[in-house]
Image (spheres, rainbow, N blue to C red):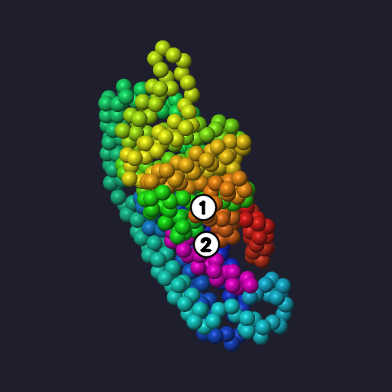
């Protein structure tokens, strides 16, 4: 229900804005024509969103491409959020409840005539985009229902998958056994499980403020040793944002651009160990290049000499190995979440990561943590972004959850004012968490 739930949040916001504007027009009978046009645009947009939500629910899980994308939802949400914030400031609840405030309301209409016209134009653009998506998605559903080619297409894909798996088994089974043993030796803590869990927790549309920010895009597009530090209070959603950052970096990954990531976890002592963190990073790089794997294999033989007991990898040797392996790529992105969760090992981990980021000319590092002084001492020259749960993200999440619960009969709210109060209390009470 990714896109559908986000659209449900937009529906709630659009309806809320319309009720505020309608209340203003009802109190101010001679309101400007621009305000009346504005009200019409909001009402029409709300109708489109209601229809789009129904279609999105119907098509959820279908295997053809939908025209509506989460970025469409995000930018529409930004516009609605901007409008709602100004309306809330202009018409606080205490004033809206008082009879006879028509003159004051007219004088305190929060938008100038030009701003109102600009907002009308912006709403019309969103209407046009969403209307097109609605018509295309309806057409796609119709074509899918009328076509019998999907079953044939699925059968062909099944055959291709079977042949690919068989080819893998026949040509790589010997190598797979050897490499699995080597990779298992180094990858003692696999961050993939943490990554998958964080992705599942992430609500669609949230976090785009970060991945679309100038600081992050600069870091992502830079091939030199750029450095970025994302910090915030406990509960600000750093780990969930880390998954978004990693996914954006992975989109750039290819044979020339490598990505390595790790999640430190205070509940897992093994994930706090500097050796395990560097082992995982080295293992990630080895999986992405044949020559890198050969270097990891050579160090594996050092750690497992013939006729002698194996010895654990050394952090300093791993540090140098990662720098050596990075030379086989044009660009290496290393992302580590939860540096503050390494306990007594925090300083040692920070020192190693900063050293790798500064000595590797084609390595860029991104670290997420709390803002603690001993961490700031190491990362003070990093580009910094303060993380707090954005009110716009929270409002979209809360609005969508309320709408989904109402539609599924798990929540019964008859008063629209009560719904608005619940949203405001939850968002304002979160205090950035």
Q: CA distance from mark 2 to mark 1?
A: 39 Å
Q: Which residues are magenta?
A: 71-89
Tell me the SS state at disc 1.
Answer: loop
Foreground residue among 310 and 207: 310
Per the image, the residue denoted by label 2 is 10
In the image: residue 111, left or right of residue 216: right
Going from N to C along the chain, the mark reached first, 2 or 1, is: 2
- Location of residue 239 with respect to 109 vertically, above or below: above
Mark 1 surroundings: few (<14), some (14-19) or many (≥20) residues within 10 A: few
Q: Position of residue 281 (x, y in %)?
A: 44, 36
Q: Residue at x 37, y 50 (%)?
A: 223
Q: Residue 108: within the magenta?
A: no
Q: Position of residue 202 (x, y in %)?
A: 52, 48
- Location of residue 121 with respect to 59 vertically, above or below: below
Per the image, the residue denoted by label 1 is 381
Q: Position of residue 402 (x, y in %)?
A: 60, 56
- Location of residue 275 with respect to 80 vertically, above or below: above
Foreground residue among 43 and 428: 428
**Rendered image quadrant of residue 411:** bottom right
Q: Residue at x 59, y 87 (%)?
A: 30
Q: Position of residue 211 (x, y in %)?
A: 46, 55
């Amino acid at each position: 229900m990714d896109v559908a739930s986000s659209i449900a949040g937009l529906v709630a916001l659009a309806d809320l804005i319309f009720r505020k504007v309608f209340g203003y027009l009802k109190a101010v009978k001679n309101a400007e024509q621009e305000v009346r046009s504005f009200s019409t645009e909001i009402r029409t947009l709300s109708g489109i969103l209601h229809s789009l939500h129904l279609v999105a629910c119907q098509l959820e899980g279908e295997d053809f491409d939908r025209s509506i994308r989460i970025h469409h939802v995000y930018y529409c949400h930004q516009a609605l959020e901007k409008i709602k914030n100004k309306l809330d400031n202009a018409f606080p609840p205490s004033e809206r409840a008082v009879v006879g405030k028509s003159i004051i309301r007219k004088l305190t209409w929060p938008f100038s005539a030009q701003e109102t016209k600009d907002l009308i134009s912006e709403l019309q653009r969103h209407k046009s985009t969403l209307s097109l998506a609605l018509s295309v998605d309806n057409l796609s559903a119709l074509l899918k229902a009328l076509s019998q080619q999907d079953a044939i297409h699925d059968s062909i894909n099944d055959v291709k998958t079977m042949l690919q798996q068989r080819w893998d088994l026949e040509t790589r089974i010997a190598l797979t056994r050897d490499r699995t043993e080597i990779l298992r030796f180094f990858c003692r803590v696999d961050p993939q499980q943490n990554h998958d869990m964080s992705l599942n927790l992430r609500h669609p549309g949230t976090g785009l403020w970060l991945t679309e920010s100038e600081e992050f895009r600069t870091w992502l597009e830079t091939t030199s040793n750029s450095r970025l530090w994302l910090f915030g209070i406990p509960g600000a959603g750093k780990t969930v944002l880390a998954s978004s950052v990693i996914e954006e970096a992975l989109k750039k990954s290819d044979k020339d651009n490598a990505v390595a990531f790790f999640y430190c976890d205070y509940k897992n002592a093994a994930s706090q160990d500097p050796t395990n963190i560097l082992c995982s990073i080295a293992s990630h790089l080895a999986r992405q290049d044949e020559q890198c794997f050969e270097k990891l294999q050579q160090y594996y033989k050092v750690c497992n000499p013939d006729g002698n007991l194996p010895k654990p990898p050394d952090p300093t040797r791993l540090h140098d190995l990662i720098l050596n392996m990075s030379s086989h790529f044009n660009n290496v992105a290393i992302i580590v979440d939860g540096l503050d969760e390494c306990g007594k090992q925090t300083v040692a981990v920070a020192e190693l990561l900063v050293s790798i980021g500064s000595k590797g000319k084609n390595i860029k590092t991104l670290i997420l943590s709390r803002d603690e002084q001993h961490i700031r001492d190491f990362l003070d020259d990093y580009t910094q972004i303060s993380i707090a749960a954005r009110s716009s993200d929270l409002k979209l999440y809360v609005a969508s959850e309320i709408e989904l619960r109402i539609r599924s009969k798990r929540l019964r709210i008859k008063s629209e004012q009560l719904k608005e109060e619940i949203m405001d209390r939850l968002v304002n009470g979160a205090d950035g968490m």
